[in-house]
Amino acid sequence: MRRCVDCRIILDDNVRYCPKCGNEIALDDSSAQSSASDVQLLLRSASLHRSREDWERAIADATDALRLDPRNPDVPSLLGDIYEKQGMRDEAIAWYQMALEMNPDSSADKEHLERLSELILEEGRHKRSESHNTLQSRTKTWGWALGSVFIVIIILAAISISRGRSVESTLNPPVPTARPHYGTAAPVTPPTQALPPGPSTPSDVSAASSAGGSVRTPGELYIRSELAGSQDITAAGAAVNDLIADPRSGVVSVTFTVRFTPHLSKDNIITAAAVIARNTFELNREVKFVTARCLVEIGGAQGTQIAFVGDVARQSIESISPTATTEQIAAIFTTPWWNPQIK
């Protein structure tokens, strides 16, 4: 039986963090050895399933190992390799980045990350080149087609004018010039009245310019509306302002604000960011990554400032317990940036 030093509540033997105050609970030698042994068994099982290409079981075992030891760099490195072998490069990059943050000296993870980044860049260049060639080919085809249509129109117009003149010369023979003193006066025709100008219609450009505002897709507006009405996000002290989706890699960027108080800390912001990311993943299964961007309205001359920006993968959010500590939550955000004024 063990107790929390601060709360003095009784804890289970395998608990690493106090569920009430969040303090880390020191394990005795036997518990630590048992936990480390469980992690190694799960890693070996995940590696075996990976070699057999049983991806679901491999991911499940690696995720269980991450829950037991969230600071073990071998776990995200193994997950990155599993996703890389499935061809899911974006997910693999996220896990390799997490492994490097835990162990910056890992040369193997650096090589994997550099190779995948280069492959993604090369694919992007290849797609842009194919798109450019396709556009050029279509432009030439349309140019020839329009040129042919223009020539046909000119030929038809020339034929029509020629036939009209031939008919006119047949119906109206020339007037003889003899006896000019019998010349006839041209008939007087009543002057035609010009029609009043009709009401002008607004052009497309003016209609488009009067619309104004930021353009968002129905899907983006739906997720933003759901997040804005979420009780969990409101309880975390945050308010969602904007949302932009990038369908190329399944990334959604969410901008939210928290109210500035003298006691505002990183724990408040990182908790709100995790709640927003979890709700975003639940609203759309196609979202793979969430970029959380926190703004703080300080007021005065400083105005609104960026307080935090961080990326989190779906697997990271799903692998962490809802009762996790802020330290555990902060560990799953990759490439975090903090405003120096936030302590």
Image (cartoon, rainbow, N blue to C red):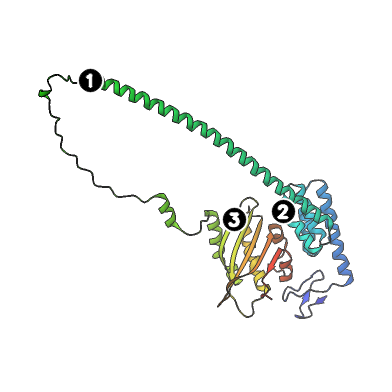
Say which label, 1 or 2, has the lower sequence index.
Answer: 2
Q: Where is residue 161 in the image (x, y as percent from the top left)?
A: 33, 25
- Residue 324, percent across and down? 72, 68
Residue 339 figure quarter: bottom right
Q: Residue 227 location, x and y as percent? A: 57, 63
Q: Can residue 93 be seen in this view?
A: yes
Left or right of 296 in this view: 331: right
The mark nearer the N terminus, 3 or 2, is 2
Gap in angstroms between the C-alphas marked 1 and 2: 83 Å
Of 124 and 73, nearer the camera is 124
Q: Which residue is drawn at 69% across and 61% down?
A: 317
Q: Quadrant of the N terminus?
A: bottom right
Q: Residue 91, which numbered label? A: 2
Q: What element carries label 2?
A: helix
The 10 Å Cα crowd at callout 2, few under 14, some 14 to 19, many 20 or more, is many
Q: Label 3: few (<14), some or many (≥20) within 10 Å?
A: some
Q: Relative to the observer, which residue lies in front, 173 or 221?
A: 173
Label pair 3/1, CB-CB below 8 angstroms = no
Residue flagged by tag 3: what amino acid is it?
Answer: Ala
Q: Mark 1 points at which residue?
A: 171
Instruction: Find numbered disc 1 in the image and state the secondary structure of the residue it sits on.
Output: helix
Image quadrant where residue 79 sits: bottom right
Residue located 44% across and 28% down the image: 151
Dot 3: what SS?
A: strand
Instruction: Please give the residue where the numbered disc 3 appears in the rendered image.
Output: 245
Q: Which amino acid, by three-letter code, is at mark 1?
A: Leu
- Please report contact status of discs 3 and 2: CB closer than 8 Å, yes or no: no
Which amino acid, by three-letter code, is at mark 2?
Glu
